[in-house]
């Protein structure tokens, strides 16, 4: 089985359209089903990655995402859980992609410092790769990343247009983390939006008007309150404080559903799931009340979730790549 699949491009027979790969559906909290935040997007034959949380890059290959064809990585914000897998991701785009130029990484102001740090951390390793495999496999000129800082004053800004592909960054509310972005991706007649980390923010709905699928972060406030109470009862004051703090800059599943309804989205996929849901039996509790706000399909994602939007169609197809 391994010999039959190793090195095979599993995208060649895909229908033209938008294909979304949840390589990391989790948060900083450990969850056996969910790695750090990471979403791969295949638009036609062009590949992009949004955030690079720990473990996400290791899921992309088994899911059939063409990591080596990644044209650009976009960061929503500079919290560690959204970028702690960036070095590993860049190693994959370099070696698997036979790159002769560094991978572009775009994100908020401060992205240059992050990229410079990862380049420095992996530079010694890169010399070993080239020495061992040769320049045909590990071309030194393709190592690492170059940074592009997205800085704008309006609520949204077009950051990429290439043929049928349009990517727009929009501001979200993740204070004190600022700036923080979501992204909208339009390809031909299909579209998605990725919220990034945010409190309930009307700008997400405004920027996501008419999308086929809204991918929105979600934190269940009641479940996290229960965790806070447990921590307090156990004398874990630091953990209790964290469980209190995180509730003010994330969005509940109910409010994510309200956002999807206001946007006129056709479907809602929740990711960046807090707290951990190690058992699917917890999902109904997690999404309680959300269906009252959004009548269309709501999916609580896990690593491996794939959503396919064929061009020229209204279909929304769901798959699991792991």
Image (cartoon, grey):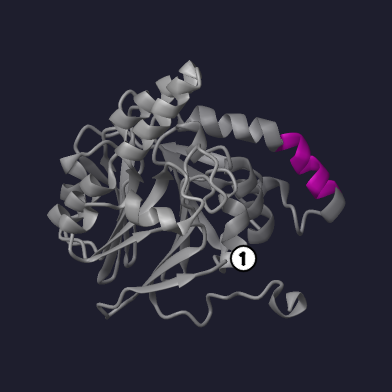
Q: Toward the viewer: 51 or 121?
A: 51
Quick one: quadrant of the N terminus? bottom right
Residue reaching furthest right? 132
Residue depicted at x 25% and y 71%: 189
> Considering depth in this image, is 36 or 228 the residue closer to the camera?
228
Can the viewer see residue 160 in this picture? no
Q: Quadrant of residue 293?
A: bottom left
Q: Which one is in front, 15 or 202?
A: 202
Name the residue that disc number 1 marks.
Answer: 62
Residue 220, image x and y in percent? 33, 42
Nearest to the observer: residue 163 or residue 195: 195
Residue 74 x, y percent position in the rendering: 43, 46
Answer few, some or many: residues within 10 Å of disc 1's Cα (few below 14, many 20 plus, some between 14 and 19).
some
Which portion, as a residue range, is magenta? 123-131
Can you say which quadrant of the picture contains the C terminus? Answer: bottom right
Check residue 129 for magenta coloring. yes
Residue 266 shows in the view: yes
Q: Is residue 288 above or below residue 16?
A: above
User: Which residue is found at the position 28% from the left and 71% from the top?
Assistant: 188
């Amino acid at each position: 089985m391994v010999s039959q699949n190793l090195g095979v491009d599993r995208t060649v027979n895909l229908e033209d359209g938008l294909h979304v790969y949840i390589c990391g559906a989790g948060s900083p909290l450990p969850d056996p089903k969910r790695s750090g935040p990471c979403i791969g997007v295949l638009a036609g034959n062009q590949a992009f990655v949004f955030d690079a949380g720990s473990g996400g890059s290791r899921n992309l290959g088994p899911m059939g995402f063409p990591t080596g064809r990644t044209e650009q990585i976009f960061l929503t914000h500079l919290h560690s859980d959204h970028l702690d897998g960036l070095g590993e991701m860049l190693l994959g785009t370099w070696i698997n992609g036979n790159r002769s130029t560094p991978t572009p990484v775009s994100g908020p102001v401060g992205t240059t410092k992050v990229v410079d740090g990862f380049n420095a951390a992996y530079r010694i390793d890169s010399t070993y790769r080239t020495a061992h495999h040769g320049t045909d496999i590990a071309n030194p000129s393709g190592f690492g990343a170059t940074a592009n800082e997205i800085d704008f004053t309006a609520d949204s800004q077009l950051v990429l247009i290439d043929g049928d592909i349009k990517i727009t960054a929009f501001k979200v509310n993740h204070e004190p983390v600022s700036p923080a972005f979501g992204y909208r991706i339009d390809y031909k007649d299909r579209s998605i939006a990725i919220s990034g980390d945010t409190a309930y923010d009307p700008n997400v709905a405004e920027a996501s008007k008419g999308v086929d699928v809204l991918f929105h972060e979600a934190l269940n406030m009641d479940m996290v309150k229960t965790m806070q109470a447990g921590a307090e009862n156990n004398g874990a004051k630091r953990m209790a404080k964290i469980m209190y703090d995180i509730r003010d800059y994330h969005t509940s599943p109910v409010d994510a559903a309200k956002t999807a309804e206001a946007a006129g989205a056709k479907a809602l996929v929740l990711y960046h799931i807090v707290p951990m849901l190690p058992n699917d039996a917890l999902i109904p509790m997690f999404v309680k009340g959300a269906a009252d706000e959004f009548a269309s399909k709501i999916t609580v994602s896990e690593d491996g979730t794939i959503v396919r939007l064929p061009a020229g169609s209204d279909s929304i197809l769901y798959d699991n790549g792991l």
